[in-house]
């Protein structure tokens, strides 16, 4: 009986640790992608015109901003498997990421 109770407690603790670890991993990955950003613009299926960011930067607004391009792509060298390609401007990103 003692062994059964010990095993049950061990399983409950293991499940709790796994849930906590997965939540932390999700938060860290979200932070890695979003950084300290509070807003984002998305262009939908057609995307945004490349000149939109340039016009925003040159508009005189004193707001920190950085472009992030995210797209799902595939490669014949990788067996046509889809993966997410994430492009950032490292010079503009310094205000948003550590």
Image (cartoon, rainbow, N blue to C red):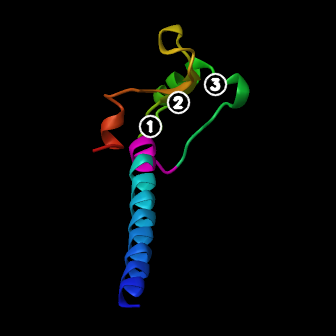
Which residue: 39% across, 78% down? 7
Which residue: 41% across, 66% down? 20
Q: Are marks 3 and 1 in contact (CB under 8 Å)?
A: no
Within-10-Å neighbours for mark 3: few <14, some 14–19, many 20+ = few
Tell me where the magenta segment starts and ends, as one range: 30-38
Q: Residue under circle 3?
A: 48
Within-10-Å neighbours for mark 1: few <14, some 14–19, many 20+ = some
Which residue: 36% across, 31% down? 92
Check the image and report above or below for 9 versus 18: below
Measured as percent of width and height from the top left, residue 94 is found at 30, 37
Residue 75 shown left or right of residue 9 in the figure: right
Q: Nearer the viewer, residue 77 or 13?
A: 13
Measured as percent of width and height from the top left, residue 84 is found at 52, 28
Check the image and report above or below for 71 versus 19: above
Within-10-Å neighbours for mark 2: few <14, some 14–19, many 20+ = few
Between label 2 and label 1, give the one nearer the viewer: 1
Question: Could you tell me how far apart the alpha carbons at marks 3 and 1 are, in whole angstroms?
Answer: 15 Å
Which mark identifies residue 56? 2
Which residue: 44% across, 76% down? 12
Q: Are marks 2 and 3 in contact (CB under 8 Å)?
A: no
In what quadrant of the picture does the N terminus appear? Answer: bottom left
In what quadrant of the picture does the C terminus appear? Answer: top left
Question: Could you tell me how far apart the alpha carbons at marks 2 and 3 are, in whole angstroms?
Answer: 12 Å
Mark with earlier residue (2, 1): 2
Question: Is residue 32 found inside the magenta-colored segment of the image?
Answer: yes
Counting labels gives: 3
Between label 3 and label 1, give the one nearer the viewer: 3
Residue 52 shown left or right of residue 6 in the figure: right
Q: Are marks 2 and 1 in contact (CB under 8 Å)?
A: yes
Q: Residue under circle 1?
A: 65
Mark with earlier residue (3, 1): 3
């Amino acid at each position: 009986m003692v062994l059964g109770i010990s095993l049950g407690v061990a399983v409950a603790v293991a499940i709790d640790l796994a849930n906590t670890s997965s939540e932390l991993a999700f938060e860290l990955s979200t932070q890695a992608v979003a950084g300290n950003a509070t807003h984002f613009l998305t262009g939908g299926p057609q995307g945004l015109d490349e000149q939109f960011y340039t016009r925003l930067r040159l508009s005189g607004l004193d707001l920190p901003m950085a472009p992030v391009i995210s797209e799902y792509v595939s490669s014949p060298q990788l067996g046509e498997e889809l993966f997410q390609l994430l492009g950032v401007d490292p010079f503009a990103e310094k205000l948003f990421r550590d």
